């Protein structure tokens, strides 16, 4: 957060609407991260990490002592994430209230946020080399006059849609020859 006098963060009342929206998006991202860290899969992974670390540094511990130490450390981390989640939830409420006072449509903001998050997750899942290859194929197709999504074979053969929808029994010999 911005700090005007170096001692205290700016209150929502003194921030611009754009800054409030940016803060809301940032805090929502942090809330999602906190929620993710409290899911069973993340806790199990963290448990394994803690166990490996303690086992490496404290080899003299018995399995029972190791389990107790892991449980204690994991319990502390879970409580920290729960506290963090609660603070973030409170911050979100404060930011939402400040935006509502300024007549900002929260439903539209969250719609935009969800659309952006979905688009980012789609883009993150595809490696750069695949994006570059797809862009090159799209460019080549456009140069050759093919429309996007149009089916054709690797040789560039464009199948007649009437033939594609037929069963083998429905084809006459000339159609079979064309396919072969």
Image (tube, grey):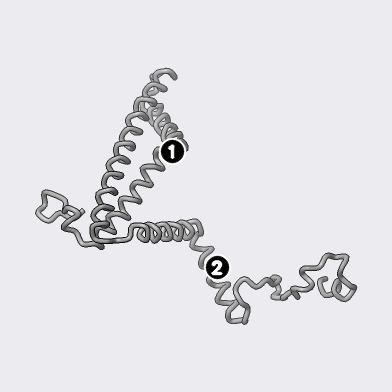
In the shown orientation, is residue 33 left or right of residue 125? left
Q: In this view, does 102 lie above or below 158?
A: above
- Tag of residue 93: none
Residue 100, percent from left and from top: 27, 57
Residue 128: x, y in percent? 48, 62
Q: What element carries label 2?
A: helix
Q: Residues within 10 Å of mark 1 (few under 14, many from 20)?
A: few
Q: Position of residue 115 (x, y in %)?
A: 43, 60
Quadrant containing the C terminus is bottom right
- How busy is the neighbourhood of tag 2: few (under 14 within 10 Å), some, or many (20 plus)? few
User: Considering depth in this image, is 6 or 85 the residue closer to the camera?
Assistant: 85
SS for callout 1: loop
Q: Which sits earlier in the primary sequence, circle 2 or circle 1?
A: 1
Q: Do the residues labelled 2 and 1 touch (CB within 8 Å)?
A: no
**Residue 149 falls in image quadrant:** bottom right
Label placed on residue 39: 1
Residue 41 lies left or right of residue 88; in this view the side is: right
Name the residue rendered at 35%, 25% in the picture: 72
What residue is shown at x 35% (from left), y 51% (from top)? 29
User: Nearer the viewer's eye, disc 2 or disc 1?
Assistant: 1
Residue 95 lies, with reference to residue 42, above or below; the image says below
Q: Nearer the viewer, residue 25 or 60?
A: 25
Residue displayed at 35% across by 59% down: 109
How far is disc 2 from disc 1 in space, using C-alphas?
36 Å
Q: Name the residue under label 2.
A: 133
């Amino acid at each position: 957060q911005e700090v005007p006098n170096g001692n205290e963060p700016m209150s929502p009342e003194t921030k611009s609407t754009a800054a409030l929206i940016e803060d809301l998006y940032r805090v929502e991202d942090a809330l999602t991260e906190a929620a993710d860290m409290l899911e069973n899969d993340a806790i199990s992974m963290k448990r394994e990490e803690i166990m490996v670390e303690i086992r490496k540094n404290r080899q003299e511990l018995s399995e029972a002592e190791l389990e107790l130490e892991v449980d204690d450390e994991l319990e502390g981390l879970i409580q920290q994430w729960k506290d963090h989640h609660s603070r973030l939830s409170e911050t979100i409420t404060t930011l939402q209230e400040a935006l509502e006072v300024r007549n900002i449509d929260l439903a539209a903001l969250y719609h935009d946020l969800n659309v952006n998050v979905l688009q980012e997750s789609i883009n993150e899942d595809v490696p750069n080399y695949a994006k570059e290859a797809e862009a090159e194929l799209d460019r080549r197709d456009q140069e050759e006059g093919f429309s996007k999504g149009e089916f054709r074979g690797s040789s560039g053969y464009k199948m007649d849609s009437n033939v594609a929808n037929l069963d083998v029994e429905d084809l006459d010999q000339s159609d079979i020859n064309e396919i072969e």
